[in-house]
Amino acid sequence: METFTKRTTGRPAHWEVAGLSWLAEQKSAGGADVVEVVGLDSGGLTESRVVETGASPDAASDFGRRLAVTHDVHDVNWGEGPRGWEGSGYRGPNQRLLDLPLTPQESWGVMYAENQLMSLVPDAGYDATGVAVFERLAQRLRDGEFETGDSPARLHGDLWSGNLMWTSDGCVLIDPSAHVGHRETDLAALALFGCPYLDRIINGYNEVHPLAGGWGERVRLHQLSMVLMHAVVFGGGYRREALEIARAYG
């Protein structure tokens, strides 16, 4: 077996392993494929090497169906991390990992407001006026104005297109920030930076788990957590973009 070693060590490496293992729980039930962990030591995290071939329409449809199965999870609370994980998790690029609060919450709106958004706002460089925009949105979320009735889902948590590897056997997931959240968040992340055959992925997903009505109107809301994380790490245009999204929904 050919392998690849990432220079991720310590607790962040254990976080990634926990996420990959948790996502892989659904593979035997028809869930998405997940990169195999081969070893973990002081030198880094070793995984099986994935040979990419490029996406295809059929592979995208298949991945959408499989992702819907991966999202299925039971006996969990909004905001929790992978089974058995204790304390906060991590999000963001390896060169600047940010804490991901994993406090269990009573609803998706409370979780998204507290764990995903307001935990980042203090470090995103906004003045008092900008912070107030996020506070207004956070209150609408806490009040349940964007709830869809969906049950908690097992999320990849960083599902931009760079974390999908297309092989001759289908799509393989890598580099998660796995936690319990709303299924629409993973799908919105795929749309943020563009993803090949996204329409086929969505259609495949809908075959297994139809999305709640008005899904398209909530895409930018679900992208906000990732955009805001980029605002903290990179600033610039991401800071403006995050504020615009928050204003649109707040």
Image (tube, rainbow, N blue to C red):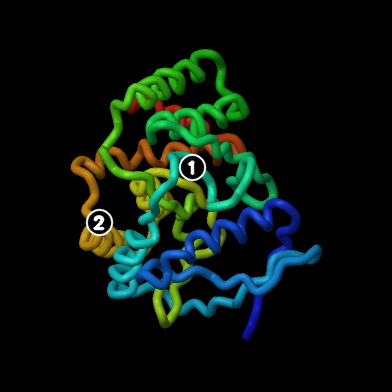
Residue density around tag 1, few if under 14, some if 14–19, many if 20 or more, within 10 Å: many
Examine the rendered structure and indicate whether residue 42 appears above or below residue 51: above
Asked where in the image residue 201 lies, by quadrant, the reply is bottom left
Between marks 1 and 2 in the image, the one whose residue lies nearer the viewer: 2
Amino acid type assigned to the residue bearing label 1 in the image: Met
* Residue 237 visible: no
Q: Position of residue 160 (x, y in %)?
A: 46, 55
Q: Look at the image and tell me in which quarter the N terminus lies.
A: bottom right
Residue sitting at x 45%, y 59%: 161
What whole-number distance in Å separates the C-alpha atoms at marks 1 and 2?
A: 24 Å
Residue at numbered disc 1 = 226
Residue at numbered disc 2 = 209
Q: Position of residue 17 (x, y in %)?
A: 61, 61
* Residue 25 visible: yes
Amino acid type assigned to the residue bearing label 2 in the image: His
Q: Look at the image and tell me in which quarter the C terminus lies.
A: top left
Residue sitting at x 25%, y 43%: 215
